[in-house]
Image (cartoon, rainbow, N blue to C red):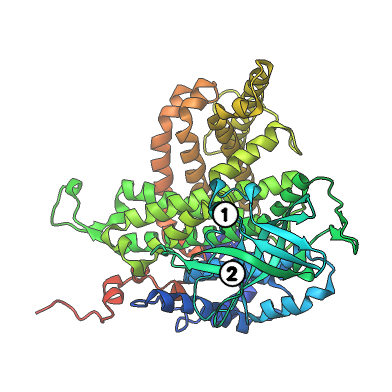
Amino acid sequence: MTLESGRSLRDTLSSLVHGDSYRKLQPRLGEIFSPDVFARPSGLSEQERYSLTYERLRHINGMVDTSTPLLRQRELLFPLLEWAAMADPSLFYAFFLHHCTTIGSVLEFGKDRDDLDDLLAELASTSVVGALLMTELGHGNSNAAVRTEAVYDRDHNEFVLTTPGPEAVKYPPSVGAEGVARTGIVTARLKVGEQDCGLFCFVVPIRDSEGACQGVRIEPQDSPSILPLDWAVVSFDGVRVPYRYWLRDSASISNDGTFTDALSTPALRSRQASRLIRYVWEGAAVGLAAVARGSAAIAVRHAHERLTNGTFAGNFASAMPVIRYRNQQRTLFGALSSAFVAAMAAKVIASPDPMPQTAGAIRTVFTLKAAIDQIAERVTIASREASGVLGFSPQNRFLDYQGLAHSFNAAGLSSQVLYLNAAWTMALGLDYQAPADDPLPPGDRSLRDPAVWSLLTTARERRLHEELVDELGKARADGLSEFDAWNDRFDLAERMAQAHAARLLVGVIRTEVDALAEPRAKEVARTVCALHVLTEIMTHSGWYLAEGLLTAAEARSLPALLNELCAEIAPNALDLADALDVPYEIVGAPIAQADYASAFTNVAAAGPLG
């Protein structure tokens, strides 16, 4: 469809996903991610697969200028992460661990230090590959319960890194591949004399091209087939770490062995890890939104070509595309809608200027990450299931993308833990004020009106927040401990944080869609986003009904309204799928092509057999 401006509907809608800077970068991305280099591998051994991951990492690195860390080139970093996620999820994982968490740790906690320049140069060249060794096998993988010790040796001005027991082994860093030199960022509890100084990050060489470094024990672990990485268990036995490899931030140790830190307690110091985790949230959000986009676009394109003789069609000899069926539309257009919402949220997180480091801004980033992760899991699963048996073919990428979504539900804290952390800060009023519960307009109103979406999601957040604060207050008044006060209210806390995420997403949708200048594009965008929002509202329609926020007639009307939206989306579905900016040439899914059977079998269509 061509709009009044002369631009295509596809190109106009793609501005919801990317800005102008991305358009200028696209040709360069196509050169970096050459289909010859990024063809999906098959028949490789585990070690060959790991080697390919790091070869591809070095390939990308060699194609871009990393003399300035990519974390400081956000307009380049995030498109690279997107394409890496769609081309090879294992590569995405290695890429973001290297450029975001490893180099990010040095930049964050070694700020304004020139004695780390050689390390940054080494990492920039990928002559060594970075890894993050934070979580440990025991204590529920809690970052707050790290047991690895770094004991200061005053005589040698070094630290001695030790794993005190099996519960303190680092798991699961991806450092098991042979022949790849690795440097890790290791979180450990610093001890100076008898003083516990809290958790700090240390730069630790893990292995060289010959094997594990002295005192480092690496035990390779089985790799999941859906996200093949060189996972391992790592422990330390008296590993000596030079003083300069202590990423000390504002702390120091004087010549007489006195430890000082601008942060007053070990607990405050240990919480500083969140400054590093934000890089995980940002990178994860971008990659997860990318695989949601890829899954939805592939599945929608395929559904227009996949024919079926339906039982309910009334004519068993008549074949029609499966996208004609409303159940397929509800599934696939729902995936398409949610993919757009995830993309718009990721666009906010990946803005050229990072969000300020206030409590509220940090909460917004990790809440959106959790929401995007849940969307990615739903979209990848729905897209695979709707594509029939071909959805299970590794060539068609759904399993790869689903694996990435599953893995990030645990990486950088699980989505549930992130929601609970958000609820805790909101209940305490940390840089948070509950939104006003404005009255809904009287009389007739349209559930398709974005203003109504805002009123409904705002009211849900406000009322659940009031309920949580009230319940916690009663529990404390009854003498319950803080643990017991929260323990029976985790479900309520999670629902409140999810309501907060839903309100944030509606705000993102309204801002992005309202910015479209073309009336027709704005109408199509609003329709496709309505499917996501109203599906969310229908999920909680019983609550809205009980709270008097929906009438019984409105609640009953929602299924038919979703069908109406699908009918309106259908004529523009392919434009919408392509507006998700999926580079099909590097995704390589055969079913994304019109003649998917020939693409799948690598033979040209030759007409009827015989």
Q: Is residue 594 left or right of residue 536?
A: left
Label 2: how many Cα within 10 Å (few below 14, some 14–19, many 20+) = many
Residue occupied by mark 2: 216
Residue extending farthest top: 478
| Viewer-side residue, 204 vs 509 | 204
Q: Residue visible at 78% across and 77% down?
A: 117
**Element at label 1:** loop
Q: Is residue 26 left or right of residue 228?
A: right
Can residue 4 be seen here? no
User: Residue 164: where, in percent of width, then height?
Assistant: 61, 55
**Mark number displayed over residue 165:** 1
Q: Residue visible at 60% across and 66% down?
A: 97
Location of residue 169 (image quadrant): bottom right
Q: Is residue 355 left or right of residue 320?
A: right
The quadrant of the rendering that contains the C terminus is bottom left
Residue type at mark 1? Gly
User: Residue 499: where, in percent of width, then height?
Assistant: 58, 36
Residue extending farthest front: 155
User: Residue 448: where, in percent of width, then height?
Assistant: 52, 39
Residue type at mark 2? Val
Q: In this picture, is 154 found above or below 277? A: below
Location of residue 277 (image quadrant): bottom right
User: Residue 535: where, in percent of width, then height?
Assistant: 46, 40
| Viewer-side residue, 404 vs 577 | 404
Q: Residue visible at 74% across and 33% down?
A: 429
How far apart are labels 2 and 1 at the CA level? 14 Å
Q: In this picture, is 59 found above or below 16? A: below
